[in-house]
Image (cartoon, helix red, strand yellow):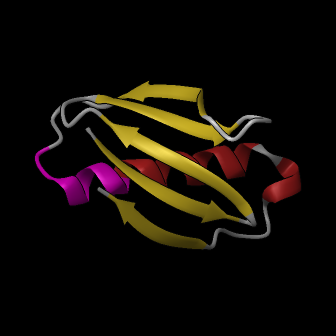
Amino acid sequence: MKHWELEVEGEHIRAEWNEAATFNMQRRDFVGKWVDYHCFTVYGIESEHEALECVVEMIQEEIERDENRHEGLELWLREKV
């Protein structure tokens, strides 16, 4: 299992990947535990870099759908092992 912690427009989120096809997007709950808020599947991923590109693409699509967040996307990536 791989995951990346991201800051997107001031919000701290985590993307978790099962190193196959499934992704879980997570936020911290009120006691600080990571909880899933969105899951998606992408088949044919061949590398960790490609998996991270899928995460970034999903975040960009999510922002485009949210009219209040159309000002852009700033990511600071910090891989957690």
Residue located 66% across and 56% down the image: 12
Residue 9 lies in quadrant = bottom right
Residue 56 rendering spot, x and y as whole percentages: 47, 56
Q: Is 8 situated left or right of 40 in this image?
A: right
Name the residue furthest left.
46
Front residue (pair 37, 44) = 37
80 or 63, nearer to the observer: 80
Please tell me whether residue 12 is drawn above or below residue 15 in the rendered image: below
Quarter of the N terminus within the rendering: top left
Give the position of the C terminus as an image quadrant. bottom left
Q: Nearer the viewer, residue 44 or 25?
A: 25
Magenta-span inclusion, residue 5: no
- Image coordinates of residue 67 in percent, x first then y, are 85, 50
Q: Residue at x 20, y 54 (%)?
A: 48
Predominant secondary structure in magenta? helix
Q: Residue at x 58, y 54 (%)?
A: 60
Q: Residue 29 placed where, x, y %?
A: 73, 34
- Above or below, 51 relative to 76: above
Total marks drawn?
A: 0
Of all residues, the one furthest to the right in this rendering is: 68
Horizontal and vertical percent position of residue 75: 56, 70
What residue span does the magenta drawing correspond to?
A: 46-53
List the single residue furthest toward the front: 31
Residue at the spot 46% in from the left edge and 69% down from the top edge: 77
In the figure, 74 relative to 59: above or below? below
Q: Is residue 50 above or below residue 23?
A: below
Q: Is residue 62 left or right of residue 81?
A: right
